[in-house]
Amino acid sequence: MKHMNRRQFTKDLAFLSGITVTLTSCGGGGGSSYSNPAGSTAPPTTNASGDKLGQISANHGHTARIASAEIAAENAVTINIEGTAGHPHMVTVPAAAIRDLRTGRTVQTNSTTTDGHNHTVVFSGESTEPPSNY
């Protein structure tokens, strides 16, 4: 299995979904904010509690999580993905995207712009269809 970094993942995802994505970096390298299970090369997309974990482009310490209870409620959510990055970005996931996640679709959205950059956040579902963009 080929190991893929976030930049390549985002480029491949954009190609598969027919969208244009501008990749930006905000210093500090493109490190990830998750721990892979032993032997896995892909980031986890759901934790043991059923929360959805976002995959973040050009990541440098941000984390994104939508609680399983928020998915079950099917209401819009706004989350701060600051993590250990030292600066916040807000991500709004509308109710329609939450419904898509609940039914297994992959969704993506962009964060707010802070310090001259933003991030694309992808919450993966079980479906192999291209992500819904919000």
Image (cartoon, helix red, strand yellow):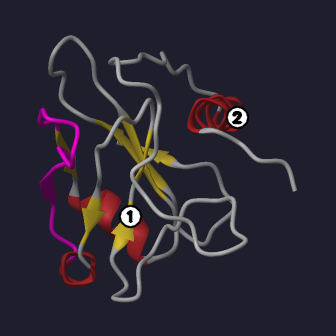
Residue at the spot x=18%, y=29% of the render? 112
Tell me which amino acid carries mark 1. Leu
Dot 1 falls on a residue whose secondary structure is strand
Furthest-bottom residue in this view: 49
> Relative to 38, is 116 above or below?
above
Residue at the spot x=14%, y=53% of the render? 79
Tell me which amino acid carries mark 2. Asp
Residue that numbered label 2 is attached to: 12
Residue at the spot x=46%, y=38% of the render? 31
Q: Position of residue 17 (x, y in %)?
A: 64, 37
Q: In 3D space, how far apart are the residues under numbered discs 2 and 1 (Cα atoms)?
A: 19 Å
Horizontal side of residue 87 vs 110, given as left or right: left
> Relative to 18, is 77 above or below?
below
Dot 2 falls on a residue whose secondary structure is helix
Task: Check contact, mark 2 vs mark 1: CB within 8 A.
Answer: no
> Relative to 43, is 121 above or below?
above
For label 2, the crowd category at 10 Å Cα-Cα, with few meaning under 14, some 14 to 19 and many 20 or more, is: few
The one nearer the camera, 4 or 70, is 4
29 drawn magenta: no
Residue that numbered label 1 is attached to: 53
Q: Which secondary structure type mostly characterizes the magenta part of the structure?
A: loop
Furthest-top residue in this view: 116
87 drawn magenta: yes
Q: Where is residue 70 in the image (x, y as percent from the top left)?
A: 19, 76
Q: Where is residue 117 in the image (x, y as percent from the top left)?
A: 27, 17
| Magenta span | 74-89
Q: Where is residue 89 in the image (x, y as percent from the top left)?
A: 16, 36
